[in-house]
Image (spheres, helix red, strand yellow):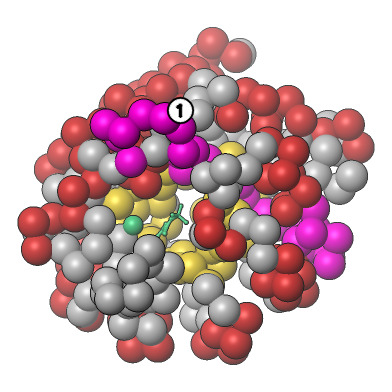
Amino acid sequence: MLVSRENHPQDTVVKVNNTSVGGGNLTIIAGPCSVESEEQIVSIARAVKENGATILRGGAFKPRTSPYSFQGLGKEALNYLSIARKETGLPVITEITDIRELDLFDDIDIVQVGARNMQNFALLKEVGRFNKPVLLKRGYAATYEELLYSAEYIMAEGNENVILCERGIRTFEQYTRNTVDIACVPVIKKMSHLPILVDASHGTGKHELVEPLSLAAIAAGADGIMVEVHDNPDEALSDGSQSQMIGRYAAMTAKIKRLYETMKEFEA
Ligand code: PEP
Ligand code: MN
């Protein structure tokens, strides 16, 4: 298997413009759930960049449970992302929900395949033939083996730049939106050479739980985190309750950076 550490003992380092994911580089992907306007994405992009973000996120095509919920600004959002990218120099990541969108992704640095599409094999093959890094999120009912087979679909098409992301799985617990599976991190690290991040925003659904679970992810050996940040979470068009305000995000990233360095010292 191309994903397995057995055949590839060294960590894979995915180069994304001026930043690298994996191999001892701390990755912080931050930004709103959805791109809502040019002003919104540019101002959040500036704020997260000032506070440790290495990559900007922002949804353009949103996979929503209800067809009546905000579906994202689509193509317009991609234009705003490319403005934010130019303004800040941050690489950008956004989710693809349909193979036909790929032509619009020229100015996107990382293509995200979301949890709901983890086993959309046609989409996996297509991004495997596309010349951009892919971030693959774990499906909320997917085993580690299934996650790795999905990554294998991408790699088998020739794309070696795959980043994995644990984003919480569905359990009997109702208090949190999902249950962040911290064990995923050391297990995947053992099985595979691919970088793995943890998204505690979707993982918990609660902004106040993002910091403790993100720190836990780093302590468990994750290569970084994904986090939803909003300047006005109460008015967010999607996922406001799990989005951090800038101040709280800034305080969290300071701790994340220190913990990441401490973990490196432990390994040295
Ligand atoms: C997202 O990151 O915007 C998203 C929808 O995440 P997930 O696929 O993990 O639900
Ligand atoms: Mn979201």
Viewer-closest of 51 and 148:
148
Q: Position of residue 156 (x, y in %)?
A: 85, 60
Query: Image point 33% across, 68% down: which residue?
Result: 66
User: Which secondary structure type mostly characterizes the magenta part of the structure?
Assistant: loop
Q: Is residue 42 above or below residue 137?
A: below
Q: Position of residue 16 (x, y in %)?
A: 57, 60
Quadrant housing residue 193: top right
Query: Image point 83% across, 65% down: which residue?
Result: 158
Q: Is residue 172 above or below residue 178?
A: above
Quadrant housing residue 91: bottom left
Q: Is residue 100 above or below residue 156?
A: below
Q: Is residue 212 above or below residue 13?
A: above
- Indicate yes or no whether the magenta region holds residue 157: yes
The residue under label 1 is: 217
Residue 171 can be seen, yes or no: yes
Viewer-closest of 225 and 42:
225
Q: Is residue 55 left or right of residue 136?
A: left
Viewer-closest of 142 and 240:
142
Query: Image point 52% across, 45% down: which residue?
Result: 140
Q: Quadrant of the N terminus?
A: top right
- Indicate yes or no whether the magenta region holds residue 134: no
Query: Judging from the image, what secondary structure is the residue with disc 1 in?
Result: helix
Residue stretch in magenta: 152-177
Q: Quadrant of the C terminus?
A: top right
Q: Quadrant of ligand 1?
A: bottom left
Viewer-closest of 6 and 153:
153
Q: Position of residue 262 (x, y in %)?
A: 44, 17
Query: Image point 21% across, 40% down: which residue?
Result: 207
Q: Position of residue 202 (x, y in %)?
A: 37, 46
Q: Is residue 106 left or right of residue 191?
A: left
